Amino acid sequence: MTKNNKAFILGSYHCCYSFTAKEMPSMGETVMGYRFKMSGGAKGHGQMLAAALAGAEISGIMRVGDDEYGHMCIHDFERAGIDCTHVKIDKEHATGAAGVMLNEKGENIIIVVPGANAEITTQDIDNAEPMIRECAVAGFQFENNFDAIEYAIRKAHALGVETMVDPAPVVEFDEELYQFITYMKPNEHEASLLSGIQVVDYDTAVQAGRILLEKGVNKAVVITMGGKGSVLVEKDRERVFPCVPVIVRDTTSAGDTFAGAFVAGIASGMELTEAVIHAGCIAACAVKRGPQESIFEFFPEKEELEKMKADYRKLL
């Protein structure tokens, strides 16, 4: 399919409350923290912003509440140049909410209450069909009403649009859905749950990726592995991409930044390995950011990104 640099993402958004302490508390334990932050974001929100800032023409399909955080979300999208025609303000349901706990290593635990994200309907998807038809690729995550997610994946596939699924958080679904997924991007935890293979290293990541391809994923599985980098598994080859060498300060948005940048790479017509390099380098900029920085502050300029990619290719 000819790429046209247009993509849509079925989005999600939450008001986020982040707490940072030296160590995570154990069950029933209280610990003293040293940083608190209120912000807005979610997997779909981060992926949409990353895809737009990475150069794709992005449209969103999602719902937010008619509240401060919902309007903040739309402001972020407009700032990034995202088409918000199908981003609906839901006057009956609040914007979703998330609580994030971070330790000093940047590792995190997150609890999400979906709010308006769970109210997306199949009618919302049908209303966006003219926009969907114009896209080269569509991005999905699992923070929305899953009936609408499944419907949108099937519809995009039927309209000839490639689909990229970030299966987080992992939910049970009919495995028939795999045949409508062009690319899947789980992390090692999600890949383990979906494949039944405990992903602990590159070899087990390849095994898990092969199982997901056997289940029906059309073209490729990209398994992100935190500090170990990522593994690209296609039907006739696999390739390891070590982590881009940076000082890690905050991993919260790394996976979503990778997913959005990967969508942008595919939409622009990049070959798969190049799309993974593109996404990995942009995600590296996310993990080296400070905890208070937004994606607009850490996202690399074109010259910086191209140099980072050139330096990284020398390591492969």
Image (tube, rainbow, N blue to C red):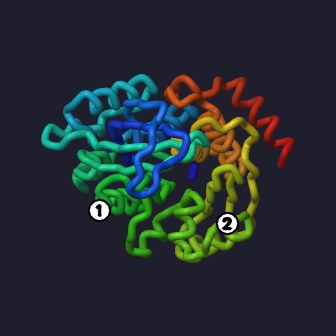
Residue at image position (35%, 44%) is 98
Q: Which mark is residue 310?
A: none
Mark 2 / mark 1, whichever is N-terminal: 1
Nearer the observer, disc 2 or disc 1? 2
- For residue 262, side relative to residue 201 (left or right): left
- For residue 279, side relative to residue 156 (left or right): right
Q: Amino acid at mark 1?
A: Asp
- For residue 58, side relative to residue 283 (left or right): left
Q: Amino acid at mark 2?
A: Val
- Looking at this view, name the residue that lies furthest to the left: 92
Q: Which mark is residue 200?
A: 2
Q: Are marks 2 and 1 in contact (CB under 8 Å)?
A: no
- Residue 256 x/y as whole percent: 51, 45
Image quadrant in which you'd find residue 172? bottom left
Image quadrant in which you'd find residue 173? bottom left
Image quadrant in which you'd find residue 77? top left
Whole-Å distance between the Cαs marked 2 and 1?
A: 32 Å
Residue at image position (62%, 40%) is 283
- For residue 218, side relative to residue 311 (left or right): left
Q: Is residue 192 above or below residue 286?
A: below
Residue at image position (49%, 63%) is 181
- Residue 314 x/y as whole percent: 86, 42
Q: Crowding at label 1, few (<14), some or many (≥20) Cα neighbours within 10 Å?
A: few
Identify the secondary structure beneath mark 1: helix
- Looking at this view, name the residue that lies furthest to the right: 314
Identify the secondary structure beneath mark 2: loop
Name the residue tied to disc 1: 147
- Residue 185 visible here: yes
